[in-house]
């Protein structure tokens, strides 16, 4: 049989024009990296690609695209925040004669627009569709859209091609063990992309992927890692021997299962992102968010997770029709009351494909702003009870207060003194320890900020008395410093940002 023709393939994640602080880009810089992690889609697609393709993976956040190499075919993953850049790249490579395939949620729900800049859209899950698209490409019969109402079984996955990624520029790798979500929150795309029925990989397949990965630091990108507690426990028992450190997303009800919480901590979990979204029950009802809510139950659940030595990354959204500017103060007070230093605060956005997008479009409340603004700190909608400049200014005031070192010190002293954060995490090199120790010393000792100095002395005392693991103590200081630095970068660009907001501000919808 004759050898197959060779093709050059670029797989690209476009850069974002704006990056918000939850991306942890400043934290990555401290580790000498460009980005915390790259989208899992790129190495996953590469693993589905036949051997006769010469594959190059490019994430524009960590490296530039080559100017002297023209690929035969280009695959570009898209989000709303990268849509404009993705379409620019599509136009560029088509002008060079390359075939361009778009994937990802933005292109999936904006197919007509995407096809103005590319040759093809793979909507939804790529498995099966990607391989077919490549086969059709080789026969010069590439279709415009590859779509299916049937979801893939998702029992096994080939290991992602991390060998094609410059691992020196990212800190951790993404991993996924399930797809689907039984919930149907209006502002979320997960159930629209992957369906409402949960599908799980064989645990042995997951273990092999972890063993093959070029990192001991992971983030499980599953929307809710522990929704199936039986599977979650089996997974935890399987990965305990692997000695990895990882974060994930899950519901607060993980705290109702002591065995699962213990297994997660033993398996290396150090951080859980919990989508509280709103403390306003009317806003939760409005958005069809019927989980992660509990009023007085919050305190017990938060305390139990912290007692397991696991940080909570508390995520909130402001901008629902029942929200006023007072929601920001309520969220700040809540995080103080429950000692939650890690807070992801976002303004409501409406990506194409969500029920929120449909609602705001039908009501004429979608603003004609660039989709790249939808990263969490820019207002992109005509809010019911808040003007755009009003919600933006209050947002900036709140995140600045959340990550002032006065606030960080008070939360940190209360949280870390519980004696639960004693389990060491993953190993790092002696060089990296020296680098991070120097960064910590210069930022927390060589400063005029008394709260930084007090917090540093407090954490060092806990480390010396073995009330906290060294990596957990320094990791807390560095993560807080990363948040603080990113928000200070927002302040340096504040006038530019306020000008962008003012140009599209139309006041509160109720006052129209």
Image (tube, rainbow, N blue to C red):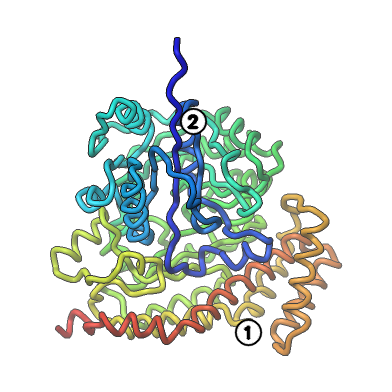
Q: Residues within 10 Å of mark 1 (few under 14, many from 20)?
A: some
Spatial separation of the CA atoms under disc 1 and disc 2:
46 Å
Residue nearest the observer in this picture, 235 or 441: 441
Q: Earlier in the sequence, mark 1 or mark 2?
A: 2
Q: Position of residue 444 (x, y in %)?
A: 74, 79
Q: Secondary structure at mark 1?
A: helix
Q: Secondary structure at mark 2?
A: loop
Residue 364 disc label: none
Q: Which residue is mark 2?
A: 157
Residue 406 disc label: 1
Is 307 situated above or below 317? above
- Quarter of the figure with residue 127: top left
Instruction: Kindly indicate whether the residue at mark 2 contacts the one at mark 1 (C-beta within 8 angstroms).
Output: no
Q: Residue furthest top?
A: 1
Q: Residue furthest right?
A: 464
Residue nearest the observer in this picture, 34 or 425: 34
Quadrant where the image shows the C terminus: bottom left
Mark nearer the viewer, 1 or 2 = 2
Please indicate, yes or no, whether residue 408 appears anywhere in the rendered image: yes
Q: Is residue 143 left or right of residue 395?
A: left
Q: Position of residue 56 (x, y in %)?
A: 51, 41
Is 157 situated above or below 173? above
Residue nearest the observer in this picture, 214 or 264: 214
Q: Position of residue 477 (x, y in %)?
A: 69, 70
């Amino acid at each position: 049989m004759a050898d197959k023709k060779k093709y050059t393939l670029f797989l690209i994640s476009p850069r974002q024009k704006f990056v918000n602080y939850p991306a942890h880009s400043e934290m990555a810089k401290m580790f000498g990296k460009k980005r915390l992690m790259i989208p899992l889609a790129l190495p996953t697609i590469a693993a589905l690609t036949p051997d006769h393709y010469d594959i190059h993976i490019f994430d524009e956040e960590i490296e530039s695209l080559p100017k002297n190499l023209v690929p035969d075919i280009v695959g570009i993953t898209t989000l709303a925040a990268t849509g404009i850049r993705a379409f620019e790249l599509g136009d560029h490579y088509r002008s060079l004669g390359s075939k361009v395939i778009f994937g990802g949620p933005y292109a999936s729900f904006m197919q007509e627009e995407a096809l103005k800049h590319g040759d093809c859209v793979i909507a939804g899950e790529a498995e099966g569709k990607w391989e077919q698209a490549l086969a059709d490409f080789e026969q010069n019969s590439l279709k415009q859209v590859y779509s299916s109402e049937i979801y893939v079984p998702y029992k096994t996955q080939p290991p992602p091609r991390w060998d094609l990624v410059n691992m020196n520029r990212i800190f951790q790798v993404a991993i996924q063990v399930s797809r689907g979500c039984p919930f149907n929150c209006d502002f979320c795309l997960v159930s629209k992309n992957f369906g409402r029925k949960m599908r799980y990989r064989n645990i042995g397949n997951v273990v092999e992927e972890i063993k093959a990965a070029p990192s001991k630091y992971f983030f499980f990108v599953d929307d809710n890692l522990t929704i199936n507690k039986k599977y979650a426990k089996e997974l935890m028992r399987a990965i305990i021997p692997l000695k990895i450190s990882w974060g994930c997303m899950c519901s607060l009800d993980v705290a109702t299962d002591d065995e699962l919480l213990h297994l997660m901590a033993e398996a290396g979990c150090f951080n859980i992102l919990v989508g509280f979204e709103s403390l306003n029950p009317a806003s939760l009802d409005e958005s069809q968010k019927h989980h992660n809510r509990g009023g007085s139950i919050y305190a017990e659940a938060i305390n139990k997770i912290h007692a397991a030595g696991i940080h909570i990354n508390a995520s909130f959204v402001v901008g629902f029709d029942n929200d006023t500017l007072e929601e920001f103060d309520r969220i700040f007070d809540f995080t103080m009351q429950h000692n939650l230093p890690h807070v992801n605060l976002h303004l409501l956005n409406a990506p194409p494909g969500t029920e929120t997008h449909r609602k705001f479009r039908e009501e004429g409340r979608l603003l004609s702003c660039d989709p790249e603004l939808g990263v969490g700190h820019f207002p992109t909608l005509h809010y019911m009870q808040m003007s755009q400049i009003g919600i933006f200014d209050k947002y900036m005031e709140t995140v600045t207060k959340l990550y002032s070192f006065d606030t960080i010190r008070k939360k940190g002293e209360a949280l870390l003194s519980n004696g639960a954060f004693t389990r060491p995490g993953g190993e790092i090199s002696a060089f990296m320890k020296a680098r991070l120790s120097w960064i910590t010393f210069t930022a927390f000792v060589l400063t005029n900020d008394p709260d930084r100095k007090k917090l540093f002395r407090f954490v060092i005392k806990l480390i010396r008395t073995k009330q906290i693991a060294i990596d957990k103590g320094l990791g807390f200081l560095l993560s807080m410093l990363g948040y603080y630095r990113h928000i200070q970068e927002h302040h340096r660009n504040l006038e530019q940002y306020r000008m962008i907001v003012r140009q599209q501000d139309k006041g509160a919808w109720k006052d129209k």
